[in-house]
């Protein structure tokens, strides 16, 4: 079975490290991390990833989030990578579609079940 590679974009060190550790431990996924859109773009160009988890709170404004999503969606290397938001903000399916993301997982999330939630959204557990 192929090891999944996840890119986690999160600017808070403690949250990023604990989330990475849980995803690696629970599912055995390889988790790459980034703290900014520039770092995320560079990592997705350098290494193929299966999904990108984006902490919505990492971006200071909607414009910043739109910029990274636009860059990902318009880059041939990254345009087909599913994006899942991690957020305290409630979003509708219409907003997901407008942003071009698969879904959002509400924060605070249960670290032990996060991998299961991601797998379910992407159909990895079938």
Image (cartoon, rainbow, N blue to C red):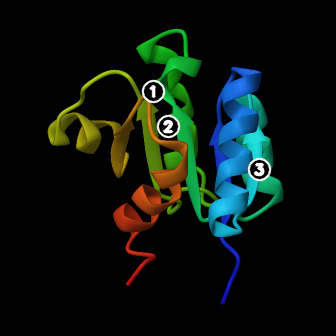
At 66% from the left edge and 28% from the top edge, which residue is drawn? Answer: 15
For this orientation, the residue located farthest to the bottom is: 1
The percent coordinates of residue 49 (x first, y second) are: 67, 62
- Per the rendering, the mark at residue 13 is none
Q: Earlier in the sequence, mark 1 or mark 3?
A: 3
| Residue 60 versus residue 59 in the image, above or below | above
Q: Secondary structure at mark 2?
A: helix
Q: Is residue 75 left or right of residue 122?
A: right
* CA–CA distance in space, label 2 to label 1: 5 Å
Q: Residue at x 54, y 44 (%)?
A: 111
Badge 3 crowding class, 10 Å Cα cut-off, few under 14, some 14 to 19, many 20 or more, is some
Residue 103 on image: x %, y %:
33, 47
Q: Quadrant of residue 109?
A: top left
Whether residue 100 is visible here, answered yes or no, is: no
Quadrant (top left/top right/bottom left/bottom right) for the N terminus: bottom right
Task: Give the label on residue 32, or none.
Answer: 3
Q: Where does label 2 land, which residue?
A: 69
Residue extending farthest to the top is: 60
Above or below: residue 47 compared with residue 55: below
On the image, the x and y values in percent for residue 62 come to 42, 16
Q: Is residue 43 in view from this perspective? A: yes
Frontmost residue, 10 versus 94: 10
Asked if the residue under mark 3 is in contact with the one under mark 2, i.e. CB atoms within 8 Å, the reply is: no
Q: Which residue is mark 1?
A: 66
Q: Is residue 48 left or right of residue 72?
A: right
Q: Residue at x 16, y 39 (%)?
A: 94
């Amino acid at each position: 079975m192929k090891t999944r590679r996840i890119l986690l974009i999160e600017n808070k060190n403690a949250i990023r490290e604990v989330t990475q550790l849980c995803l690696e431990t629970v599912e055995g996924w390889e988790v790459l991390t980034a703290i900014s859109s520039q770092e995320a773009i560079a990592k997705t160009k350098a290494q193929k990833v299966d999904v990108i988890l984006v902490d919505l709170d990492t971006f200071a404004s909607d414009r910043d989030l739109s910029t990274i999503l636009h860059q990902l969606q318009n880059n041939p290397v990254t345009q087909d990578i599913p994006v899942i938001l991690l957020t305290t903000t409630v979003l509708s399916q219409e907003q997901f579609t407008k942003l071009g993301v698969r879904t959002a997982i509400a924060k605070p999330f249960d670290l032990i079940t996060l991998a299961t939630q991601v797998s379910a959204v992407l159909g990895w557990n079938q």
